[in-house]
Amino acid sequence: MNIYELQSKRRTIRKFTDKQIDYSLLEKFVEHARLSASGRNLQPIRYYIASKVELVDEIFKYVSWAGYLKGAHSPSFEERPRAYILFLYNEQTITNPRWDIGAASHAIQLMAQYEGLGTCWMGAIQRDKILKTCNISNEYSLDSLLALGYPAGSPVIEDVHNEDIKYYLDENGVLHVPKLSLDEVLIK
């Protein structure tokens, strides 16, 4: 699969199978994400991999899923992710690491897609509870996390023009994700 196909097939996944992810693969993702672009090369991001079943189960309690669908497409306990990668930073070092985190998160998302995994980048999370659950030092702040697992379904992309961009479930329970067309986003 070339990079164009990889990007066009990458979708946010919110329901996963029960297949576990090899920890070395998660480390490989972080190894390559750390090479992502970094403003002034400050490299402020620190990563935490949660893959032990008990820890993943606990973190699952502190994340909110599919806001537009009001719980209709939230994963059941059996469909939960099999790992999380947390994006951490030290507020004493940098106050806004979001550009760096965006680049690193996208790198992981593409690598995960290549390896057959699905991801969901999440910011609607209970940060303090997750940090405490993971026993992470209070010198770090949690920006966001990436939920990972093997997909249990395939969302459908739809090009739209000036229409509602809220994702939705059709009558068969398939998730549809409207995306503005190229003509809508490219200013000529």
Image (cartoon, rainbow, N blue to C red):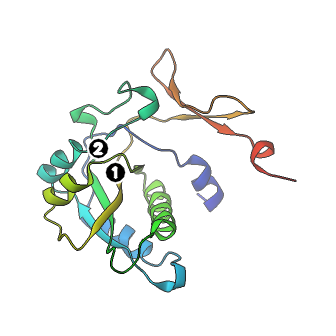
Give the residue type that dot 1 points to: Ala
Residue at 50%, 14% (x, y): give it.
171
Q: Are marks 1 and 2 in contact (CB under 8 Å)?
A: yes
SS state under label 2: loop
Residue 165 horizontal/vertical position (percent): 61, 33
* Number of residues whose C-alpha sits closer than 10 Å to that of mark 1, classed few (under 14), some (14–19) or many (20 or more): many
Q: Report the label total.
A: 2
Residue at 19%, 69% (x, y): give it.
138
| Residue 181, quarter of picture | top right
Residue 117 horizontal/vertical position (percent): 40, 51
Determine which residue is flagged by label 2.
63
The disc label shown at residue 147, or none:
1
Relative depth, front residue between 118 and 65: 65
| Residue 77, quarter of picture | top left
Establish if 55 lies above or below 28.
above
Relative depth, front residue between 127 and 100: 127
Give the residue type that dot 2 points to: Val
Residue 81 horizontal/vertical position (percent): 29, 45
Residue at 45%, 84% (x, y): give it.
42
Q: Earlier in the sequence, mark 1 or mark 2?
A: 2
> Which residue appears farthest toward the right when viewing the image?
188
**What is the quadrant of the N terminus in the image?**
bottom right
The disc label shown at residue 113, or none:
none
SS state under label 1: strand
